[in-house]
Each structure stands twice: as C-alpha cells, then as structure tokens.
Image: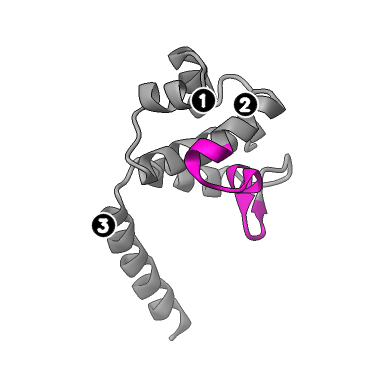
Amino acid sequence: MARLEEQFGAFVRHHRKRLNLTQPQLAEKIDRQLNAIKNIESGKKGTTFETIDRLAQALEVDPRDLFGCGDFAARSDRDDSLVDIIKLLSPLSEPELAAIKVLVEAGLKLRRT
C-alpha cells in the first residue's frame, strides 16, 4: 500500500527538481540538515508541520500540493501504482516530463478509439 511518507517524499522531490534545487540547497533554505531532506524524500521518516510549512514556502507551493493532486491522495486502500509512477517521474526535467505527457496523451487517445 502507498504510504503517506513515500508519496509526500515523491512530491517534495518533484517540486525540488522543478526548481532545480539540490538536496543540500533545499536543506539550507529550510534550515534543516541534509539527512532530514534525504529521509523525507525517501519516505523513511515523516516530518513536523513546521517543516512542511518551510518546505512549501521554499518549493513555492501550497502545503496541500505536497500530499497529493486532484483526486489522488495517499490512502491505505489505494494501489501503489500511482505512487510508483510519481517516484519514476519526479527526478525528470520539465522537457522530459513534457515528452512523457505527449506519450501518455497519445496512448490514452489510442485507448479511446
């Protein structure tokens, strides 16, 4: 099952990479140790509300954006597939994500026909 910590970490990693920040840069921006960022992104440990707020500010997102998007949110009854996809995509650059989006849209279009 998808764990909240894993999903949260995948979204943190995605938004960090979106801003072209390294883990050490993010740690410095939020006044936390590098190991804290590594543990958060890997889903090994949860974090405090204060750190969530700092992360959201540093990553220029609403705190809710670190927990899910749209109808997707970590729940114990949810399959891990979407979290796995997010983990695979989170390290990609914007051009790479745009190319993946084109492929997914083409695949979905074929499915509809």
Cα distance between the residues tagged 3 and 1:
27 Å
> Please, is residue 72 above or below residue 52 in the view?
below
Is residue 3 among the parts visible in the rendering? no
How far from the left and from the top, in percent, is residue 34?
44, 15
Q: Amino acid at mark 2?
A: Thr
Q: Residue at coordinates 72% horizontally, 43% vertically from top-left?
A: 75
> Please, is residue 46 above or below residue 106 in the view?
above
Q: Does dot 2 land on a helix, a strand or a loop?
A: helix
**Residue 80 occupies quadrant:** top right
Segment tinted magenta in the rendering: 56-72
**How many residues crowd around disc 2 within 10 Å: few (fewer than 14), some, or many (20 or more)?**
some
Q: Residue at coordinates 48% horizontally, 22% vertically from top-left?
A: 37
Q: Name the residue beneath numbered marker 1.
A: 30
Mark with earlier residue (2, 1): 1
Q: Is 70 one of the magenta-colored residues? A: yes
Cα distance between the residues tagged 2 and 3:
30 Å
Q: Does dot 3 land on a helix, a strand or a loop?
A: helix
Residue farthest along the bottom direction in this orientation = 113
How far from the left and from the top, in percent, is residue 57?
55, 39
56 displayed left or right of 16:
right
> Please, is residue 59 above or below residue 106 in the view?
above
80 displayed left or right of 113:
right
**How many residues crowd around disc 1 within 10 Å: few (fewer than 14), some, or many (20 or more)?**
some
Any mark on residue 95, and which? 3
Q: Amino acid at mark 1?
A: Ile
Cα distance between the residues tagged 2 and 1:
7 Å
Mark with earlier residue (3, 1): 1
Any mark on residue 51, and which? 2
Q: Residue at coordinates 67% horizontally, 47% vertically from top-left?
A: 78
